[in-house]
C-alpha cells in the first residue's frame, strides 16, 4: 500500500507574512476554499493572537471551509493558545500549532531564558493546547541551528504532554539536504515516544534549498510537509507546494510510491488565485506554475517536441492545470468564443465580468496583430485584481507631457471615498510626475521601493505588466497592472498599491476601535 505525506499549507499564515502580501478576510476565505479544492490536508489559517482581524479570519475559515483540518498558530503563551482555540473551535477538524525557539542564539538573545526553562514552557503550552484539541503540533523554532540532543529532550517533553506532531523547521533556511536527513534520523533514533508521532518539516528558502531539503526529509521519514502556494513567505519564502507534490509524483521511483491527496490539475488555478490576492506575481521561470514552465523556444527543443513531447517535458502541462490553445481569437470573435477560451484557460466568470473582459479583449485586438493566451490571461488576472477587495481610491483620468530636457508635467483626477479630486505634479519622466500628482491627493506618504516592467509576450506590440512596490510606514504594499501603454499600467499599479495601504489602515483602525469597545 502506498505511503502518504500530509500536505500542511501555510499560505494564509507564513505566506501572508511576505512583504505586501496582506489579504483581507474575504480574500483569505476564497483562498482557503481553493486550497480545499486542491486537496490539502491541513490549513494553517493564521495567527489568531496577532490581531482581532486575524482571529476573525481564522474563525470564519474554520466555520465555513470544510473537508480539512483548520489550524491556528500560537506561541507558548496561554493568551496565544486561548486565542487560537477561540478561532478554530468550530472547525470540522480543529488543531493548534504551538512553537518556541530552541537554538542557543534564540534562547539566549531572544527569549533570555535557560534551556530548562524553555522546556518547561513547551510542556505547559502543549498541556494547554491538549486541554482544547486532540491534535497538537509542537515546533522547535530554528531547529537546524539547535543542539541535537537538546532537540530530542524538548521533543520528548512535548510528546509526554500529548503532542501528536513534532515539527523540525529550518526556520532560517540554513541547512543542506544531507545534513537535514542526518538530523531527522538522529531525532527519530534518540527521542523517546516518537515512534507513533508524525514528523513534520517546514523549510525556508534563504539559500534556495527549501524544496530540496523538504524532499530529502521525506526520504528520512518525515510524513508531513509545511508548504505554501508559489513558495511565498518570510524573506526568500517557503517550500513551494507545487514543487514538492510534482517532485513526488514525477519521481515516484525515488520516493517508494509516496502519495499526497493533492489534485494536481488545480495547481495552476490555485497559483493564479494566490498571485492575484497577494499582488505577488509568479516569476516566468518558476517551476510548475510559471508562464515559461512549458514554453519551448530553442529550435532543437521545438524539433524534439514535434517528434515526441517527452523529449523535453517530464510532465504534461495538463497534469498541473495548464491547457494548450485550441481556439484562435481575433477582433471578429464573439462573446461565446471568448468565454469558451476563458473556460479552456481555467476561468469561470459571471456575465457582467465577462462583458468587461470582452470589451478589453476587443480593444486589445485593435492594438495588437495577434492576441495570445498569455495576453488573455493577463487581461483576466488584471481585471480580477482590480475588483477584489475594498476600493478607496479610483483613477478617473490622467495626462502627462514630456520635454527634451527630461522635465515632465502630469495631472491626475482621482475619486477618493466617492469624491473627485485633481492634482498636478512634476518629475523626472512621466511616471515620476504622475506619482507626484497622486501623492499630493492621498493622505499617506508612499515611498516607491520597486518598479518592475515586463512584456507579457515577445512581440513589439506586447502588453506590458507592471509590478509596483511601495512602503508606507513600516509596511510594504504591491500593485500590478497590465496595458499596452506602460505609463498607464505604471500609474494603475501605483494606485493599486496605495489603495491596499489605505484599506489596511482602515482595517487597523477598525480593529483598534473593536478592542476599545471590548475593554
Image (cartoon, helix red, strand yellow):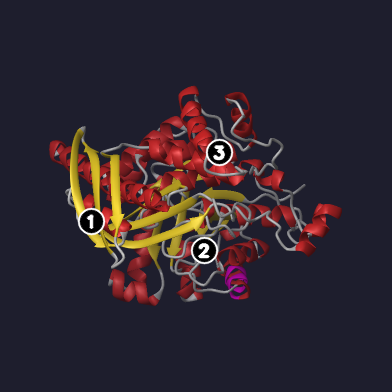
Q: Which residue is mark 1?
A: 436
Q: Residues within 10 Å of mark 2 (few under 14, many from 20)?
A: many
Q: In the image, is residue 488 above or below residue 215?
A: above
Q: Residues within 10 Å of mark 3 (few under 14, many from 20)?
A: some
**Mark sitting earlier along the chain (2/3):** 2
Segment tinted magenta in the rendering: 179-185
Picture residue at 30% right of the left edge, 75% below the top: 109
Q: Which corner quadrant holds the C terminus?
A: top left
Question: Are the residues flagged by discs 2 and 3 in contact, CB closer than 8 Å?
Answer: no
The disc placed on residue 203 is: 2
Question: Are the residues flagged by discs 1 and 2 in contact, CB closer than 8 Å?
Answer: no
Picture residue at 64% right of the left edge, 51% below the top: 5
Q: Which residue is mark 3?
A: 365
Circle 1 or circle 2, nearest the eye: 1
Picture residue at 39% right of the left edge, 44% below the top: 131
* Residue 98 is at least partly visible in this image: yes
Query: Dominant secondary structure of the magenta stretch?
Result: helix
* Residue 308 is at least partly visible in this image: no
**Closest to the observer: 54 or 294?**
294
**Closest to the observer: 492 or 184?**
492
Amino acid at each position: 500500500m502506498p505511503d502518504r505525506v500530509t500536505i500542511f499549507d501555510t499560505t494564509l499564515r507564513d505566506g501572508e507574512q511576505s512583504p505586501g502580501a496582506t489579504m483581507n478576510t474575504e480574500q483569505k476565505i476564497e483562498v482557503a476554499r481553493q486550497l480545499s479544492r486542491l486537496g490539502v490536508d491541513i490549513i494553517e489559517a493564521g495567527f489568531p493572537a496577532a490581531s482581532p482581524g486575524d482571529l476573525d479570519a481564522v474563525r470564519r475559515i474554520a466555520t465555513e471551509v470544510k473537508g480539512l483540518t483548520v489550524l491556528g498558530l500560537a506561541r507558548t503563551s496561554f493568551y496565544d493558545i486561548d486565542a487560537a482555540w477561540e478561532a478554530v473551535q468550530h472547525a470540522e477538524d480543529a488543531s493548534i500549532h504551538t512553537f518556541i525557539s530552541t537554538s542557543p542564539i534564540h534562547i539566549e538573545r531572544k527569549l533570555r531564558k535557560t534551556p530548562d526553562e524553555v522546556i518547561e514552557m513547551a510542556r505547559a503550552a502543549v498541556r494547554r493546547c491538549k486541554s482544547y484539541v486532540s491534535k497538537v503540533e509542537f515546533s522547535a523554532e530554528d531547529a537546524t541551528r539547535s543542539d541535537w540532543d537538546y532537540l530530542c529532550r524538548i521533543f520528548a517533553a512535548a510528546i509526554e504532554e500529548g503532542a501528536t506532531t513534532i515539527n523540525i523547521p529550518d526556520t532560517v533556511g540554513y541547512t543542506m539536504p544531507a545534513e537535514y536527513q542526518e538530523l531527522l534520523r538522529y531525532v527519530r533514533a534518540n527521542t523517546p515516544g516518537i515512534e507513533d508521532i508524525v514528523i513534520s518539516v517546514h523549510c525556508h528558502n534563504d539559500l534556495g534549498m527549501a524544496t530540496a531539503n523538504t524532499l530529502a526529509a521525506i526520504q528520512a521519514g518525515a510524513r508531513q510537509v509545511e508548504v505554501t502556494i508559489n513558495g511565498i513567505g518570510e524573506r526568500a519564502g517557503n517550500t513551494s507546494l507545487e514543487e514538492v507534490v510534482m517532485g513526488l509524483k514525477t519521481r515516484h521511483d525515488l520516493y517508494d510510491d509516496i502519495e499526497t491527496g493533492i489534485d494536481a490539475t488545480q495547481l495552476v488555478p490555485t497559483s493564479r488565485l494566490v498571485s492575484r490576492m497577494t499582488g505577488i506575481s509568479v516569476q516566468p521561470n518558476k517551476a510548475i506554475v510559471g508562464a515559461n514552465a512549458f514554453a519551448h523556444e530553442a529550435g532543437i527543443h521545438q524539433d524534439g517536441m514535434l517528434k515526441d513531447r517527452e523529449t523535453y517535458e517530464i510532465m504534461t502541462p495538463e497534469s498541473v492545470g495548464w491547457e494548450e490553445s485550441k481556439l484562435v481569437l481575433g477582433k471578429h470573435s464573439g462573446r461565446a468564443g471568448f468565454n469558451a477560451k476563458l473556460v479552456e484557460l481555467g476561468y469561470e466568470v459571471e456575465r457582467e465580468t465577462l462583458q468587461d473582459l470582452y470589451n478589453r479583449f476587443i480593444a486589445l485586438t485593435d492594438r495588437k496583430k495577434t492576441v495570445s493566451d498569455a495576453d488573455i490571461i493577463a487581461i483576466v488576472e488584471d481585471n480580477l485584481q482590480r475588483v477584489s477587495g475594498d476600493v478607496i481610491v479610483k483613477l478617473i483620468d490622467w495626462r502627462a507631457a514630456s520635454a527634451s530636457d527630461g522635465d515632465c508635467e502630469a495631472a491626475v483626477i482621482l475619486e477618493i471615498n466617492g469624491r473627485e479630486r485633481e492634482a498636478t505634479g512634476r518629475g523626472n519622466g512621466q511616471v515620476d510626475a504622475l506619482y507626484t500628482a497622486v501623492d499630493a491627493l492621498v493622505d499617506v506618504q508612499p515611498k516607491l521601493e520597486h518598479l518592475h516592467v515586463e512584456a507579457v509576450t515577445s512581440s513589439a506590440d506586447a502588453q506590458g505588466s507592471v509590478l509596483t512596490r511601495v512602503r508606507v510606514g513600516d509596511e510594504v504594499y504591491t500593485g500590478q497592472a497590465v496595458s499596452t501603454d506602460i505609463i498607464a499600467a505604471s500609474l494603475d499599479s501605483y494606485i493599486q498599491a496605495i489603495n491596499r495601504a489605505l484599506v489596511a489602515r482602515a482595517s487597523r483602525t477598525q480593529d483598534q476601535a473593536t478592542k476599545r469597545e471590548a475593554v
